[in-house]
Amino acid sequence: MGQNKTIETDIIIIGAGPVGLFAVFEAGLLKLKCHIVDVLPQAGGQLSEIYPKKPIYDIPGYPSVLAGDLIANLLEQIAPFEPGFTLGERAESLEKQSDGRWIVTTGRGSKLIAPVIFIAGGLGSFEPRKPPIPNIAEFEEHGVEYFVRNPELFRDKRLVIAGGGDSALDWSIYLSDIAKELTLIHRRTEFRGALDSVEKVQHLADSNKIKVMTNSQVTGLLGNGKLEAVEVQHDTEGAQNLEVDYFIPLFGLTPKLGPIGDWGLGVSNNAVEVNTFDYSTNTPGIYAIGDINTYPGKLKLILCGFHEATLACQSAFKIVHPDKKLSFKYTTVTGIEGIQAT
């Protein structure tokens, strides 16, 4: 979604991780519309950004499921309910309108309006881990990018990607067909990512489609207002400069509570306090579900977040439709609108 848009819905969900996505499903069963906002450029939270190929073993019905596949399945499950998405934007401010509805404004000026807010931000607002390069802030958005939001930005450009995990490997593979030149730099010899991705990167390097530099680190950035070159330090071969258009350090994400911590909610140990009756916060109309909440006996499991989302939706219905009676029905009896039985 573009900037400076105003969206009205029933529930604003802050956080596009698995719990936020499943909340869309439970809300959809109650005919409640949802709009999701997330600072990351794609849905899935840390499951998509940090470990998409990591197997998860405690999702009911799945002896094992890759994190990325779980997100793909959740997106397919909620597709019939047509949720809205505002991705790549962080929820910054919260205010209440005279009609009782909330307005959430993002850092890019988008405004979301609803009577109910679900905070499903996982461990908080993920921020990129930045390499210890003294002048890196000078080149942010002027050649330094911490996320690949729009791959077309890098078409026919000279890129340096730094990192040794799945994200660095996956984007090196994907962007190898888009970039003019691509160099992957890793401070160690061995990569931490999936073996299949490591093999694909090695094949690209052997085919001279990309360059791989191990035992190396980017230690400096050069340019006048815009990035022009990076300084690379090799463990034994010394330093060299590479001319580049973009430097993309992919060292994972650091969770922070972010602006939500300033919204007047009860907070304990960097988590939002909730009532386990319906996972409501101390502010009527605002709920917290998933890893971002805390209560006695809390377990930070996706499974528990699914349960919390379900009860929160039942409570939210009464706020959105105070004059309607909510009757609980099983999907085995009613089915799901938009899905054909087979």
Image (cartoon, rainbow, N blue to C red):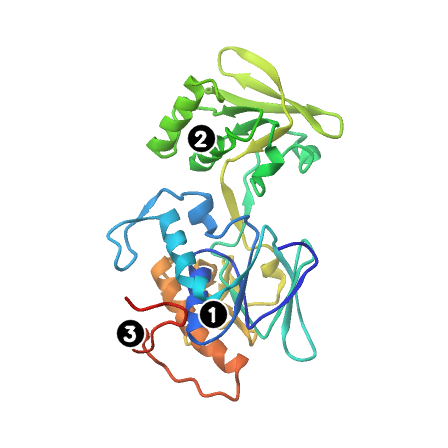
Percent across and percent down for residue 31 are 47, 75
Q: Are marks 1 and 2 in contact (CB under 8 Å)?
A: no
Reading the chain from its start, which is encountered first: label 1 or label 2?
2
On the question of residue 132 being in view, the answer is no
Quadrant (top left/top right/bottom left/bottom right) for the C terminus: bottom left
Reading the chain from its start, which is encountered first: label 3 or label 1?
1
The CA span between labels 1 and 2 is 38 Å
Q: Are marks 2 and 3 in contact (CB under 8 Å)?
A: no
Q: Is residue 108 above or below residue 307?
A: above
Which residue is at the front of the view, 78 or 110?
78
Amino acid on which disc 2 is placed = Gly
| Numbered mark located on residue 140 in the image | none
Amino acid on which disc 3 is placed = Thr
Q: Which residue is mark 1?
A: 274
Question: Would you say 78 lies left or right of 139 here?
Answer: left
Q: Which residue is mark 3?
A: 332
Which residue is at the front of the view, 120 or 339?
339
Between circles 3 and 1, the one closer to the viewer is 3
| Numbered mark located on residue 164 in the image | 2
Question: Circle 2 — which element?
Answer: loop
